Amino acid sequence: MAEPMLAVRGLNAWYGESHILHGVDLDVRQGEVVTMLGRNGAGKTTTMKSVMGLVGARKGSVRYEGRETIDLPAYRIARQGIAFCPEERAIFASLDVAENLMLPPAVGPGGMSVDTIFELFPNLKERLSSQGTKLSGGEQQMLAIARILRTGARLLLLDEPTEGLAPVIVQQIGHTIRRLKSEGFTILLVEQNFRFAATVADRHYVMEHGRIVDEIANDALEANMDKLHEYLGV
């Protein structure tokens, strides 16, 4: 079997003196959508930030397309073709939608055209000259995802993309993720809403206390629902 697009082994991470990740192992294969599930504070976001080199210190192995990245700075990791969409969305308030959208550099060929982005997110075309501060939460999330699609990155790390959004916007985000998968993108997704995750993902990792404690195939989710409720405290 070919090496996974992303292979994480024995990943440890720290913020200052705080040891957050304790030997995380996970794989994401090309073309998959994989979610990380777990309670708040389990280490899901820190895992994404560690993959991107955005933590204070990290040890272990993070291989992307067969290349070790553990010693690379964050900007060089991004240029390998990995894009991170943070939970806080990081929209520049003083810039309008068009400026936010065009800000990131290309990291590889095949970035999504602006016309295709507007097809995915027609709201953005209507708000092109609106400042970041004037956008709704859903529009900000659309813009945050749209911004990384322009870059040519092929592995997308999406942190809580549906958090706090209206159901109609959640449906649109789900449609977008399924379309991106059909077009060959690979996605690692942090998601609190496992019922939403079940509509888009191939597999799920469950995190507790900075460790991966279980892996569940999407078609086995219903059979593992009692265990999942226990993990997530729902």
Image: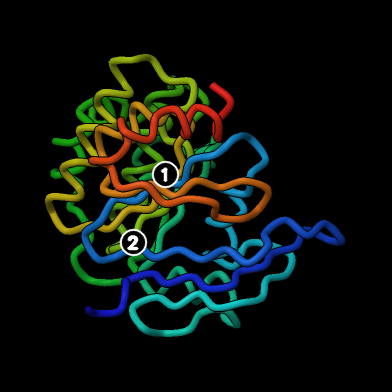
The residue where tag 2 is placed is: 155
Residue at 54%, 42% in the rendered image: 90
Q: Nearer the viewer, residue 158 or 215?
A: 215
Whether 3 is drawn above or below 209: the answer is below
From the top left corner, tell me how far across and down residue 138 is, in percent: 39, 24
Q: In the rendered structure, which disc, 2 or 1, sits on the residue that comes first in sequence?
A: 1
From the top left corner, tell me how far across and down residue 212 is, in percent: 54, 55
Q: Is residue 187 visible?
A: yes
Q: Say left or right for 89 vs 143.
A: right
From the top left corner, tell me how far across and down residue 161 is, in percent: 42, 35
Whether 125 is drawn above or below 153: the answer is above
Q: Nearer the viewer, residue 2 or 126?
A: 2
Residue at 48%, 41% in the rendered image: 37
The residue at the far right in this view is 17
User: Which amino acid type is marked by label 1?
Assistant: Asn
Mark 1: which secondary structure?
A: helix
Tell me which corner region of the image, top left, top right, bottom left or bottom right, holds residue 225.
Answer: top left
Q: Say left or right for 206 vs 99.
A: right
Q: Is residue 153 visible?
A: no
Nearest-to-viewer mark from 2 and 1: 2
Q: Residues within 10 Å of mark 1 (few under 14, many from 20)?
A: many
Whether 207 is drawn above or below 20: the answer is above
From the top left corner, tell me how far across and down residue 150 is, in percent: 28, 55
Residue at 25%, 38% in the rendered image: 200
Tell me which corner region of the image, top left, top right, bottom left or bottom right, holds residue 141.
Answer: top left
The residue where tag 1 is placed is: 100
User: Which amino acid type is marked by label 2?
Assistant: Leu
